[in-house]
Amino acid sequence: MGSARAETGDLITAREAGLVACRRCGQVHWRGTQVCLRCDGALQSRDEKSLQKVWAWLIAGIVAFFPANIYPMLLTNTLIERSESTILGGVVELMNYGNYGIAGIVFVASIVIPVGKFLAIGYLAVSVHRKDRKRMHQRHRLYEVVEFIGRWSMIDVFVVAILSALVQLNAIASINPGIAAVSFALSVVFTMLSAQSFDPRLIWDADRKDTP
């Protein structure tokens, strides 16, 4: 939502101007309208239960992240041996083979980005709860970054799925996903739901003396 300029010269929010926007299509309506006239979506000036949903999904994502790194992501069976690879184990193995670039990509996508998203979403939720008025523009940008990179966090799951489909040579060799693949996928999905549950308009409310 944009902001309007009052006669006094002060900037007012769309909410203070009596307007509400549909979060689905962006159509602006007068406040009090219950259903969007364009897409029939439910209109709500603020999601009052946003923080509860954010924390619920975030905690679920963190809980699922632990078995994703403890249990094997990949199960490899050949004629002579059976091996199990965790995420960190796979990174170390790639480095031992000299594939530093791929190892770095896997480490960043599977460890750094998920942990960074946990910290970023938690920081946004805490700052809104405390009604922090500092660095509001930066927090909005942080939220946009978290939403953007969320879709790129499935690289490990995609690799396991491709290998499992391609390497199925019966008794000679086979690759199957481990329990960590399911846990990692759930962690990514839960974190994406947590980010989507966050109402970024709550960031601006802390800067208003009286939010109607």
Image (cartoon, helix red, strand yellow):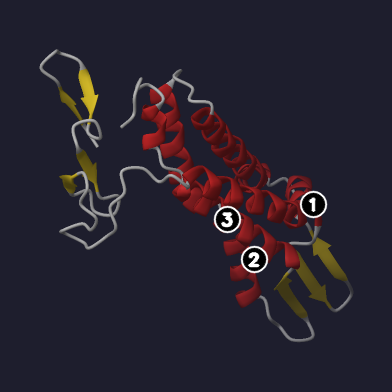
Mark sitting earlier along the chain (1/2): 1
Mark sitting earlier along the chain (2/3): 2
Residue occupying the point 61% across, 76% down: 165
Q: Which mark is residue 23?
A: none
Residue 5 x, y percent position in the rendering: 15, 22
Mark sitting earlier along the chain (1/3): 1
User: Toward the viewer: 46 or 144?
Assistant: 46
Q: Which mark is residue 160?
A: 2
Q: Quadrant of residue 168?
A: bottom right
Between marks 2 and 3, how big is the CA–CA gap?
Answer: 20 Å
Amino acid type, mark 2? Val
Amino acid type, mark 1? Gly
User: Toward the viewer: 170 or 152?
Assistant: 152
Q: Which residue position is annotated with label 1?
A: 89
Amino acid type, mark 3? Phe
Residue occupying the point 37% across, 29% down: 205
Q: Which residue position is annotated with label 3?
A: 190
Q: Is residue 192 left or right of residue 45?
A: right
How many residues crowd mark 2 within 10 Å: few (<14), some (14–19), many (20+)? some
Between marks 1 and 3, how big is the CA–CA gap?
Answer: 24 Å
Image marks 1 and 3: residues in contact by CB distance under 8 Å: no
Q: State the SS at label 2.
A: helix
Give the foreground label among 2 and 3.
3
